[in-house]
Image (cartoon, rainbow, N blue to C red):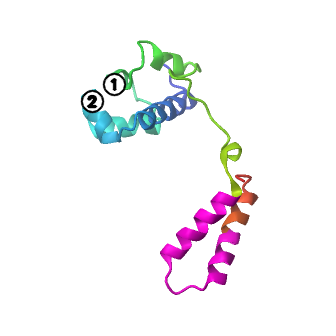
Amino acid sequence: MIRDPEGWARLGQALASARRALGLTQEELAARAGVGLGSVKNAEAGAVPKARMPYTIPAIAKALGWPDGAVDAVLEGGAPPGGWRDVSVQQHVDVERLEADLTHSYVRASDSATGAEIKAATKAALDVLRQHGLI
């Protein structure tokens, strides 16, 4: 059995991504796979098993529609079924739309702030996102 923590982390991300793509909650996936909620949480967290491949991992993968052998392929560095990949958020962010959404959120969240205070808070939030390279 593969013991590489990076492989298990990659598998966990791929399982979570596939679940979300299907619009399932962790609870729904657990029920569909016939396993406990803790098994789904551990799998998506990328927990490295202590001794052998848990029987729950293939059951979860099958419930997601993955073919046989997909789990081992992901653990060995291959791409998960469905073409999951990391995508840069920066390519998809419309800064003007983000600023408007943040402003509206602040307005809904605070009843005593002035318009100028809300605008300043929005600008501060955008500055932090820029510092982190997200926009």
**Vertical order, 96 against 55 (above or below):** below
Percent position (x, y) of residue 19? 41, 34
Q: Residue at x 66, y 76 (%)?
A: 119
Question: Which region shows up in magenta?
Answer: 96-124
Work out whether 123 lies above or below 73.
Answer: below
Magenta highlight on residue 118: yes
Principal secondary structure, stretch drawn in magenta = helix
Q: Regarding mark 2 in the picture, which secondary structure is present there?
A: helix
Could you tell me which residue is drawn at 35 percent across and 24 percent down? 54
Could you tell me which secondary element the residue under label 1 belongs to?
helix
Residue type marked 2: Arg
Residue 86: where, in percent of width, then height?
62, 34
What residue is shown at x 52% (from left), y 34% (from top)? 9
The disc labelled 1 sits on which kind of residue?
Ala
Q: Nearer the viewer, residue 25 or 4?
A: 25
Q: Which residue is mark 2?
A: 32
Left or right of 85 on screen, residue 12: left
Q: Is residue 91 visible?
A: yes
Q: Which residue is mark 1?
A: 63
Task: State whether residue 103 is above or below residue 1.
Answer: below
